[in-house]
Amino acid sequence: MSEPPPPAVVFDDLVGQQAAVDELSLAVAGSHGDPGVPGAAMTHAWLFTGPAGSGRSVAARAFAAALQCPLRGCGHCSHCRTVLAHTHADVRAVVPEGLTISVKEMRAVVQLAARGPATGRYQIVLIEDADRLTEGASNALLKAVEEPAPHTVFLLCAPSTHPDDVSVTIRSRCRVVGLRTPSTAAIADVLTRRDGIDPPTAQWAASVSAGHVGRARRLARDEEAREQRRRILAVPAALRTLGDVFTQAAELLGHAKGEATSVSESRDAAELAELRTALGAGGTGKGAVGAARGSAGVVKEMERRQKSRATRTERDVLDRALVDLSGFYRDVLARSLGSDAVLLNPDIPDQIDAAAARLGSTGALAAVDAVLACREAIELNVKPQIAIEAMMMALYAGPRSPAGVG
């Protein structure tokens, strides 16, 4: 196998993914027709897969920058800077703000991507959550991937190559780049070196992030994120009575809704104000009045999209909490079985040991199943309140039932 070119600067933010960086660097060299680099190959469709936090979208965007850059990803030219800042004219990102990517949105992007590049070397379409494509949107994308326009490149990001994440027909036309969970040491290093976080905090955040770089950064920087983690990890011990089931469920749902509201309110108001101004709100004369009247449908569509975005934000907050909870019960199960596996929550060994003594291995496994079932139910659009209350009831009842006896 040929030696890969030196890693480009734009790949510096990709943590613990040397194999992927080498593969992408070879492809960039191939796109430039570099002599003496056998094995370098470029293709028009790529699928970046890996667990949450592994850097799928980071890898895809860095690759896009390297493809546009005449110096193969220098990190300093206008192409690199604008791609990384999400403002490059020839890189179109599809980032679903709602629960899905619609066929209308995908058709519009595909039509624009069929044009020749304006300033760069390629027209690039980057789909950050390809697993959220509806069936119609997948079909619209498939047609473009099957018959790509010259100088058009598709970069898709998804958790895995499972048909539930990306259809087999699309996957078969993509070159797959698999990312892995970064090591604790790699995450701690990047937090210290790039983000200026002190080494002890970086090491702690990396050790409890379950390999999720973004989550580690958030825990290291944000006291509210740390407080939220403490609240979630306190839930198992707080489920002492039947009333606690509904209290804990209400608190979790209330926090998720509150965070979604705080994120959405200022952004939504600014978006609506800008839209109304663009549509002539505040103008005078017959033309302005007529335009304002005709804009009602556009404003309504914007409000619908904002509501969908808020729903997704709320569900994302809930999912982060459920990931923390499943990690806790995973540690409890490991301790119950006497495993020497590395704990996902090494900073709370006393809580884990107490839960292991209370639940035993069977109860811990049932608790893991209850949390995962809740995540799946929410993903399938079960009302969050019902899913969360059902999970809390299962967690409360588990150690008191025969199934919960270790």
Image: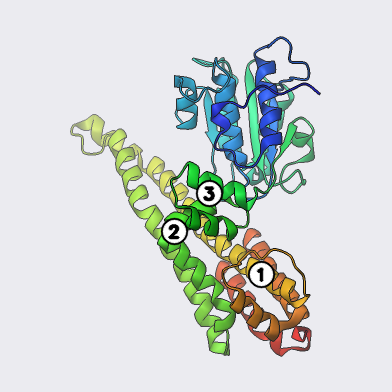
> Which residue type does callout 1 highlight?
Val
The reply, left or right, for residue 106 in relation to residue 144 is left
Q: Looking at the image, is mark 2 or mark 1 nearer the viewer?
A: 1
Within 10 angstroms of label 2, few (less than 14), some, or many (20 or more) residues? many
- Which image quarter is the C terminus in? bottom right
- Which image quarter is the N terminus in? top right
Q: Are marks 1 and 3 in contact (CB under 8 Å)?
A: no
Closer to us: 332 or 284? 332
Residue 358: % across, % down? 68, 86
Q: Which numbered tag is attached to residue 371?
A: 1
Q: CA distance from mark 1 to mark 3?
A: 24 Å
The secondary structure type at the circle numbered 3 is loop
> Which residue type does callout 2 highlight?
Ala
Q: Residue at x 51, y 60 (%)?
A: 317
Within 10 angstroms of label 1, few (less than 14), some, or many (20 or more) residues? many
When the figure is inspected, residue 343 is found, relative to residue 35, above or below; the finding is below
When the figure is inspected, residue 32 is found, relative to residue 27, above or below; the finding is above
Disc 3: which residue: 98
Asked if residue 368 can be seen in this view, the reply is: yes
Q: Which numbered tag is attached to residue 187?
A: none
Closer to us: 187 or 104? 187
Disc 2: which residue: 260
Q: Residue at x 55, y 77 (%)?
A: 235
When the figure is inspected, residue 72 is found, relative to residue 272, above or below; the finding is above
Dividing the picture into quarters, in which one does residue 35 lie?
Answer: top right
The secondary structure type at the circle numbered 1 is helix
Q: CA distance from mark 3 to mark 2?
A: 13 Å
> Which residue type does callout 3 highlight?
Gly
